[in-house]
Image (cartoon, rainbow, N blue to C red):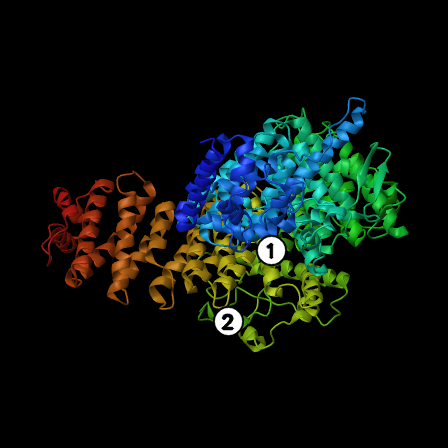
């Protein structure tokens, strides 16, 4: 084989064989390379390299070349003469072999490399050679002499790594991102195989080039559907990336940033995996969150290197070839700004979400402060682009973004800042004990650090506030901060309740302080400061307020001001502000008064552009002088005068309350059953009006201007709606009102849950029922109706506690019970009727408890009135089951109503009503029989003559149908048992008479037409 002639002949035969068939080309070239490596250098130069077959293959036009040709040329490059290299199109025309990885040459090789997918699913050997070439060191670098300094050696090493990083970026962008990934499934599979082959050999800086936007988007598209042909390959590729990321902290940070940047912070959700979560856990174990925090801030500041697509190429190299020119070519300005804004948004979210994953308390506290400083600087202050200012108090530098922030980004920073401040109780410093007594400490509260950071940035000359403050605003802000600092000083001197109030108020004032930068100091903040002084007394010392208070003769109760202020804050669009206001309400709910509950109730019952005729149609009272639902206050004064609005509203409420008290006093003097039609109609907040008057005014629906005159909070809400409507923004006013009502309902729900025994629950009922009827009628909002129903049923009527004690007025409860009972009698809407029935039962329980202390309480009067209406009015909407529930819960009401039921059954208008009356009588007999109830015995004796008459009526006029006959038998058996058990002094025959006894006996024995029920067989023993 060492003979040159034999070597040349074999070479010619191999290349001739490669030309015949495509599938023979790769094995022929492989055999040639093995043969080539065994030959001595002399034979190679004289016989093999001069072979015509080899020359034809190497000098083949690049359009006809293939992956096998490229692999052969790459392997022979070291031994080929330079003249042959120059004439070989697939090799670079340069003595530097690594020039093959330059963008200009790779672009020419792309068709050849794409063609290598023909051996799918096997990976062509040319890729392994190229990967090895990428990860190897270039030979062009001169070795460092021993006399060179250490710094120069390190500089050369850094330069070498930068070269490698640039080569990887160019190769991946040209070959994979621009050629393989946009192509067929086979080439996508090839790209994922290259990731498995290349990424374990790369550093974190090179990995950022591999984890390109194109690759990760391809993986997300495939992982979105399990039925995709490449699903398992994509899983293996993502798993390999995660394994590489877990080898080093820098690699993990790089992977997390690349994953989240492509998916806008939703990589786990889109890929249906837990990749980012697992990598965050890896950082948590190795305390790598600080590196992630620095990386995110570097990205947010928008360094110039970020504008490059998954690679870092300097401008000098960019001028050398077309790829770098295309890479650094400036895109459309608007598109760039939008992309940068989107990137900044997910960075902000990632900064906050990563704080929740940190287990190291010291590191978490440190990063919380760094994040707060970052949000404060970008939400409240502005500085020169790329400014690095020195913060003397912190002894550190802070850099502002290299590109201007958009208004949306600053708005998001402000919202997240407010959210961070409102949730600060859960963000405690290291060493804090969550179960310890509540305290507010300057060194342990993130909100106090917020104040310090604001002062620090104010002291920097190059930095200015986004909105400069006027002198009045500065004075108001100083007062606000003084109040905040004094609230902060409240420690464990008081009880936990007082500390909880201080913390809630502190949080809300912090939100207002953060808002002063964009909106200035508001009147709401000053009102809250006044409330703090009143609520905490000498603990809050503000000399500025003492002078103003001395001039006022009478100041309103601080809870009235506080509730009005909280309602105004609940109407604001800021979610953290609303959350802070809810916390204050929960802390002060023990101090609520009746006027506060009425103010809250006014919001619940308000409606925009709602026809009152539609509301009245849901209730058919049959009487033109009753209306229990809606009263609209009309005022001709200027709606812009908020003070006049409040004054008129209070005067109207006072007049209405006086009328209610007079009507209740007159009602308490009347007897239970007399003077029908003369009883006062107690309505929401004491308002009364005829339906005829409503129908006359039903055509004049309220517009926005009329609505401004009703309530201060709603007027402010509608003004915001009008301002946003002129710009073409915002939601419908009705939708905003609904959202506002839902927030207020949440406060009521909390109050009912915690304070179900408070008498103020009774005050809120009329407005809730008014809103329930309106929202349940045609054109109403079913979500609002569901929410009100849930609050009433679950939070109030089914609660263990209920209003009781000396604070509950029995006459007021009785009037409310009478009102609800009348509404239930005519209510056509099933949902509302069921809630009214539950309310009536609940009010009866409250009234029954009061009857133990007040003898004037008549619990059975409303029930008798309802029973009378049920049997003698066709428009009654109640069902017999409701009365059965009353008799089951309150047996005394059933005994007092027994005579009315017997009379109704004897003189029933229809057979159906007779059947229902008989069922109710039977239920009363079953419930009281054998319990030695003296009242039952007295009631039974009094009604025996009427019962005898009823027996004769029922048996002589036997009802039609088996069910109704069975009910007669049940009644007869129950009556026989009750008389024998509770009236044993005389025989049954003497008690009810011979005729009635005979008929009763025949009924119990089943001698009526039809079969006797099985459950009545045991009753024969009684006879």
Number of residues whose C-alpha sits closer than 10 Å to that of mark 2, classed few (under 14), some (14–19) or many (20 or more):
some
Q: Secondary structure at mark 2?
A: helix
Q: Outermost residue, top direction? A: 146
Q: Relative to 509, is 693 on the left or the right?
A: left
Tag 2 residue: 614
Identify whether 691 is placed above or below 646: below
Closer to the camera in the image, 305 or 375: 305
- Looking at marks 1 and 2 on the same chain, the residue that comes earlier in the sequence is marked by 1
Judge whether residue 647 can be spotted in this image: yes
Question: Gap between marks 1 and 2, in whole Å?
Answer: 22 Å
Q: Which percent across, then down, holds residue 987?
A: 17, 44
Find residue 284 and name its label. Answer: none
Q: Quadrant of the N terminus?
A: top left
Q: Secondary structure at mark 1?
A: helix
Tag 1 residue: 601
Closer to the camera in the image, 992 or 124: 124
For residue 730, which quarter of the picture? bottom right
For residue 636, which quarter of the picture? bottom right
Q: Which percent across, then down, holds residue 580?
A: 67, 44
Q: Relative to 22, is 659 on the left or the right?
A: right
Tell me what residue is drawn at x 88 percent, y 50 percent.
551
Whether residues under marks 1 and 2 lie with C-beta atoms below 8 angstroms apart, the answer is no
Q: Which percent across, then down, holds residue 352?
A: 65, 40
């Amino acid at each position: 084989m060492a003979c040159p002639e034999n070597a040349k002949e074999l070479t010619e035969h191999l290349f001739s064989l490669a030309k015949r068939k495509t599938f023979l080309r790769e094995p022929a070239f492989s055999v040639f390379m093995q043969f080539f490596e065994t030959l001595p250098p002399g034979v190679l130069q004289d016989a093999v390299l001069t072979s015509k077959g080899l020359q034809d293959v190497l000098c083949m036009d690049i359009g006809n070349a293939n992956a096998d040709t490229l692999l052969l040329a790459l392997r022979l490059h070291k031994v080929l003469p330079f003249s042959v290299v120059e004439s070989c199109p697939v090799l670079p025309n340069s003595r530097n072999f690594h020039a093959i990885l330059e963008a200009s040459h790779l672009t020419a090789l792309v068709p050849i490399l794409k063609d290598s997918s023909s051996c799918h699913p096997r990976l062509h050997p040319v890729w392994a050679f190229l990967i090895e070439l990428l990860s190897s060191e270039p030979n062009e670098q001169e070795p460092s002499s021993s006399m060179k300094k250490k710094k120069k050696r390190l500089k050369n090493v850094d330069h070498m790594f930068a070269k490698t990083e640039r080569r990887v970026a160019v190769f991946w962008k040209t070959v994979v991102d621009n050629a393989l990934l946009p192509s067929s499934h086979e080439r996508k599979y090839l790209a994922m195989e290259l990731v498995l082959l290349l990424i374990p050999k790369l550093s974190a800086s090179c990995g950022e080039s591999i984890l390109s936007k194109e690759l990760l988007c391809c993986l997300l598209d495939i992982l979105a559907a399990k039925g995709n042909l490449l699903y398992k390959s994509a899983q293996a590729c993502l798993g390999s990336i995660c394994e590489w990321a877990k080898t080093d902290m820098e690699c993990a940070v790089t992977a997390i940033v690349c994953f989240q940047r492509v998916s806008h912070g939703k990589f786990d959700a889109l890929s249906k995996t837990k990749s980012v979560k697992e990598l965050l856990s890896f950082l948590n174990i190795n305390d790598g969150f600080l590196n992630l925090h620095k990386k995110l801030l570097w990205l947010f500041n928008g360094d110039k290197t970020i504008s490059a697509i998954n690679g870092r190429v300097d401008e000098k190299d960019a001028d050398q070839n077309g790829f770098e020119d295309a890479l650094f070519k400036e895109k459309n300005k608007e598109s760039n700004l939008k992309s940068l804004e989107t990137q900044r948004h997910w960075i902000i979210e990632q900064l906050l979400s990563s704080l929740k994953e940190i287990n190291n308390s010291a590191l978490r506290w440190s990063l919380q402060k760094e994040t707060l400083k970052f949000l404060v600087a970008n939400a409240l202050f502005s500085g020169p682009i790329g400014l690095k200012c020195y913060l003397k108090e912190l002894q550190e530098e802070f850099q502002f973004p290299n590109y201007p922030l958009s208004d949306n980004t600053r708005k998001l920073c402000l919202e997240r800042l407010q959210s961070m401040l409102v949730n600060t109780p859960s963000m405690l410093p290291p060493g804090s004990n969550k179960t310890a007594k509540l305290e507010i400490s300057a060194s342990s509260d993130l909100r106090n650090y917020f104040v310090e950071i604001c002062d620090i940035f104010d002291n920097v000359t190059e930095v200015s506030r986004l909105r400069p403050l006027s002198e009045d605003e500065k004075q108001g802000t100083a007062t606000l901060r003084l109040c905040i600092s004094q609230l902060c000083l409240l420690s464990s001197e008081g009880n936990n309740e007082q500390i909880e109030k201080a913390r809630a108020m502190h949080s809300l004032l912090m939100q207002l302080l953060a808002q002063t930068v964009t909106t200035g100091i508001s009147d709401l903040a000053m009102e809250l400061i006044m409330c703090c002084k009143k609520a905490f007394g000498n603990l809050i010392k503000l000399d500025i307020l003492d002078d103003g208070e001395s001039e006022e003769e009478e100041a309103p109760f601080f809870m009235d001001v506080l509730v009005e202020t909280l309602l105004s804050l609940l109407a604001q669009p800021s979610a953290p502000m609303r959350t802070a206001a809810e916390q204050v309400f929960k802390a002060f709910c023990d101090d609520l008064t009746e006027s506060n509950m009425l103010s809250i109730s006014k919001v619940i019952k308000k409606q925009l552009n709602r026809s009152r005729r539609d509301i009245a149609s849901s209730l058919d009272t049959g009487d033109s002088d009753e209306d229990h639902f809606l009263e609209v206050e009309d005022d001709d004064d200027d709606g812009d005068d908020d003070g006049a609005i409040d004054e008129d509203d209070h005067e109207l409420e006072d007049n209405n309350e006086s009328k209610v008290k007079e009507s209740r006093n007159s009602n308490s003097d009347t007897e239970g059953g007399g003077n029908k039609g003369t009883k006062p109609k107690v309505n929401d907040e004491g308002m009364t009006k005829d339906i005829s008057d409503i129908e006359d005014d039903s055509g004049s629906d309220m517009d926005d201007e009329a609505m401004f005159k009703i309530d201060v909070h709603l007027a402010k809400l509608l003004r915001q709606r009008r301002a946003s409507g002129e710009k073409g923004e915002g939601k419908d006013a009705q939708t905003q009102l609904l959202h506002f009502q839902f927030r207020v309902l949440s406060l009521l729900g909390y109050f009912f849950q915690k304070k179900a025994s408070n008498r103020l629950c009774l005050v809120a009922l009329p407005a809730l029922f008014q809103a329930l009827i309106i929202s349940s009628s045609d054109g109403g909002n079913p979500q609002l109706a569901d929410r009100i129903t849930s609050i009433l049923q679950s939070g109030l009527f089914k609660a263990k506690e209920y209003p009781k004690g000396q604070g509950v007025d029995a006459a007021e409860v009785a009037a409310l019970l009478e009102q609800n009972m009348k509404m239930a009698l005519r209510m056509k809407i099933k949902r509302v009727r069921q809630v009214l029935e539950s309310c009536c039962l609940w009010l009866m329980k409250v009234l029954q408890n009061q009857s133990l202390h007040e003898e004037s309480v008549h619990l059975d009067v409303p029930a008798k009135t309802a029973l009378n209406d049920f049997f003698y009015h066709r428009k009654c909407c109640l069902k017999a089951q409701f009365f059965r529930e009353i008799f089951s819960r309150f047996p005394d009401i059933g005994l007092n109503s027994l005579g009315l039921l017997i009379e109704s059954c004897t003189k029933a208008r229809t057979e159906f009503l007779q059947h229902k009356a008989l069922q109710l009588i039977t239920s009363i007999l079953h419930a009281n029989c054998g319990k030695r109830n003296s009242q039952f015995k007295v009631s039974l004796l009094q009604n025996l003559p009427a019962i005898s008459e009823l027996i004769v009526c029922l048996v002589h006029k036997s009802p039609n149908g088996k069910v109704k006959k069975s009910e007669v038998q049940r009644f007869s058996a129950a009556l026989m048992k009750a008389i024998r058990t509770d009236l044993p002094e005389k025989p049954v025959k003497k008690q009810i008479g011979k005729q009635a006894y005979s008929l009763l006996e025949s009924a119990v024995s089943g001698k009526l037409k039809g079969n006797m029920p099985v459950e009545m067989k045991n009753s024969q023993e009684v006879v």
